[in-house]
Image: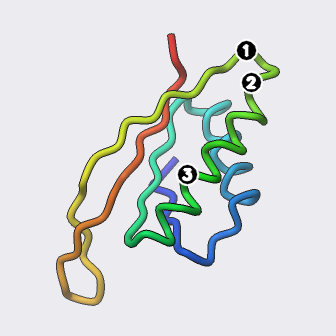
């Protein structure tokens, strides 16, 4: 699975479904957000996704990091959130 790019207009429930599917399939998902609104939607999606996979015994762990993103020829600083299953 590639990087899920989240915007401030992303639907957290839809993103959560993609996270849950990615966790079931690959055991790892990466989100990318630029800006406070996008980060807010990303975090909401992680919380919702945790509820989706918890009944299956899966506990999610998030690893946040800064990342450089090229947006229309300009370098911007974004935040990536790597989501893994807790062992």
Name the residue: 41% across, 40% down.
82
Compared with residue 42, is residue 85 higher up or lower down, i.e. above or below?
Answer: above
Q: Position of residue 44 (x, y in %)?
A: 63, 53
- Residue 27 appears in which quarter of the rendering? top right
Mark 3 closeness class: few <14, some 14–19, many ≥20 residues within 10 Å: some
What residue does disc 2 label?
54
Q: Are marks 1 and 2 in contact (CB under 8 Å)?
A: yes
Q: Are marks 1 and 3 in contact (CB under 8 Å)?
A: no
Q: Secondary structure at mark 2?
A: helix
In the picture as drawn, the residue positioned furthest to the bottom comes out as: 72
Mark 1 closeness class: few <14, some 14–19, many ≥20 residues within 10 Å: few
Gap in angstroms between the C-alphas marked 1 and 2: 5 Å
| Closer-to-camera residue (79/69) | 79
Q: Are marks 3 and 2 in contact (CB under 8 Å)?
A: no
Label 3 or label 2, whichever lies nearer to me, is 3
What residue does disc 1 label?
57
What residue does disc 3 label?
43
- Residue 71 appears in which quarter of the rendering? bottom left
Among the two numbered marks 1 and 3 on one chain, the one whose residue lies closer to the N terminus: 3
Name the residue: 72% across, 45% down.
48
Mark 2 closeness class: few <14, some 14–19, many ≥20 residues within 10 Å: few
Gap in angstroms between the C-alphas marked 1 and 3: 21 Å
Among the two numbered marks 3 and 2 on one chain, the one whose residue lies closer to the N terminus: 3
- Residue 73 appears in which quarter of the rendering? bottom left
Tally of numbered tags: 3
Compared with residue 73, is residue 5 higher up or lower down, i.e. above or below?
Answer: above
Name the residue: 68% across, 34% down.
50
Compared with residue 23, is residue 57 higher up or lower down, i.e. above or below?
Answer: above
Gap in angstroms between the C-alphas marked 3 and 2: 16 Å
Q: Judge left or right: residue 13 versus residue 23.
A: right
């Amino acid at each position: 699975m590639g990087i899920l790019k989240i915007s401030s207009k992303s639907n957290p429930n839809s993103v959560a479904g993609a996270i849950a599917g990615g966790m079931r399939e690959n055991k790892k998902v990466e989100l990318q957000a630029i800006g406070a609104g996008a980060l807010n939607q990303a975090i909401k999606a992680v919380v919702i996704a945790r509820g989706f996979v918890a009944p299956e015994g899966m506990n999610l762990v998030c690893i946040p990091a800064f990342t450089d993103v090229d947006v229309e020829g300009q370098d911007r600083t974004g935040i990536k959130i790597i989501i893994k299953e807790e062992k």
